[in-house]
Image: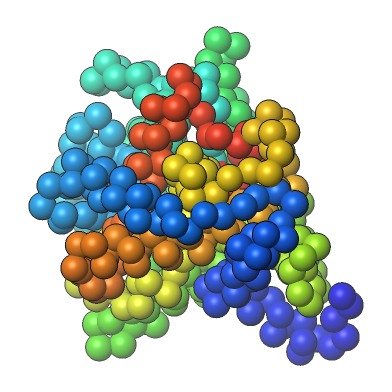
Amino acid sequence: MEIQTAEAQRELIAYLRSPDAIRGRCKQLFTLVNAGESRHFSCDLTQLGRVADYVIEVMRCEYPDLQIPFHSRWRHFEAGNVPRLAQLDSQLAELTPLAKAAAKFDLAIVSVLLDAGAGNNWYYYEPETGLSLGRSEGLAVASFWMFCQGAFSREKLLQVDAQRLQAFTEAELATGFQVNAENPLVGISGRWKLLQKLGQVLLSSPHLFGNDNPRPGNLVNYLLDQSQNGQLAATTVFNAVLEGLSDIWPGRLEVAGVNLGDVWQHPEVADDGLVPFHKLSQWLTYSLLEPLQELGLAITGLDILTGLPEYRNGGLCLDLGLISVKHSDILRLSHSVASEVIVEWRAITVILLDLIAATVREKLGLSTTELPLVKILQGGTWTAGRKIAAELRTDGQSPIQIESDGTVF
């Protein structure tokens, strides 16, 4: 559909960056699947209670008192029950609370951007503990130590600066991630390009990232200015992330020259056919909330953000029979992120996560405030998705294979 006016284009971009658009567009595909009109998937909502029971079982195992933290990058930094964050706090102890929060923003933003699927054959060996860590935990710990060693700073400080990112080489990233012929990492080039693009966008948005020494952590100052009476809406953080970082994503759809980011097309979606997800941007938003809380801010409207449409949450729904495929090729072949199959799978996952969360709360007798979606993801659906995958497949892989370039999942 051709957008006729500049104002209409701006409105469309703003809409596609909203949680309302994510849920609204995903709901269209969810309705299609439930009506039996999808070529790829069917849905059996009678399995909702069973899935919720499985998630609750995993939650009680992981967090017996149901005191669940947010689903964020900070959990991965503690992989193997190693208190790395206590070590980080001791290194930051001399800083003011504001400077400490800025350093944590620096770490979280770089680490999340490097967090796309690692593949099944890569791991990070941590000399300090002797642990070998794969997947998200390995990526997190590798980026944690790179940050602590000053790899992203010209002055070798515990911070990230734009000039250093632009000078950062693919070889340096490969060394930091211990990549070699025997330890291959999916999408290493894509990750390196994201770091370079991050350096560029930090320089191009001084109102968000500062003038004198542009860095991701300066976003803390911008968000403090947006807070009122010690409160900050989660959507304000999300909007800042999208405004500041959307240009880093490569080869995405554009409207009026604006990169839409994690937005894809599906022929069954009304109007322009566009389906937004903003998975990494929401994951990053969730990961920035804790440093803000440490500054004393109360985060409001948590459940306005959506669940994360990635292969652990989507795999949970598929592996437990909440959704099923209509032809075996979906499970046998690998699919591009832009394919109709993957867009549809992600869309129905967004809506099913809301339904699973509501069912879990109902069974536990807890409110949205007591158990927001971001905690159910952690406790929770992501962990349960990994657990059932490991039970069903020896390699613990996703039930549907996605061709990753290191920039989406």
Q: For the point 68% across and 28% down, which residue is it?
A: 332
Where 202 falls versus 41 (above or below)? below
> Can you name the residue that lies furthest to the top here?
182
For residue 375, say whether it is visible: yes
Label tally: 0
The residue sitting at 36% across, 34% down in the picture is: 387
What residue is drawn where x is 88% and y is 86%?
4
Residue 52 or residue 340, whichever sits in front: 52
- Whether residue 74 appears in this view of the structure is no
> In the rendered view, would you say 366 is above or below 86?
below
Relative horizontal placement of residue 227, taking residue 335 as reference (left or right): left
Q: Give 398 or 299, whichever is nearer the viewer.
A: 398
Quadrant of residue 274 within the rendered picture = bottom right
360 is higher (above) or lower (below) than 400: below
Q: List x then y, in percent, for residue 13.
A: 69, 76
Q: Would residue 315 appear left or right of 230 to someone viewing this image?
A: right
Q: Residue at x 21, y 54 (%)?
A: 68
The front one of 98 and 409 is 409
Spot occupied by residue 53 in the image (x, y as percentages of width and height)? 29, 50
- Which coloring applies here? rainbow
Query: Is residue 296 toward the left or the right of residue 242 in the image?
Result: left
Hey, which quadrant is residue 384 in on the image?
Answer: top left
Picture quarter with the C terminus:
top right
Which residue lies most toward the front here? 46
Q: Where is the N terminus found, in terms of image quarters?
A: bottom right
Relative image position of residue 381 (x, y in whole percent): 37, 49
Q: Nearer the viewer, residue 266 or 77?
A: 266
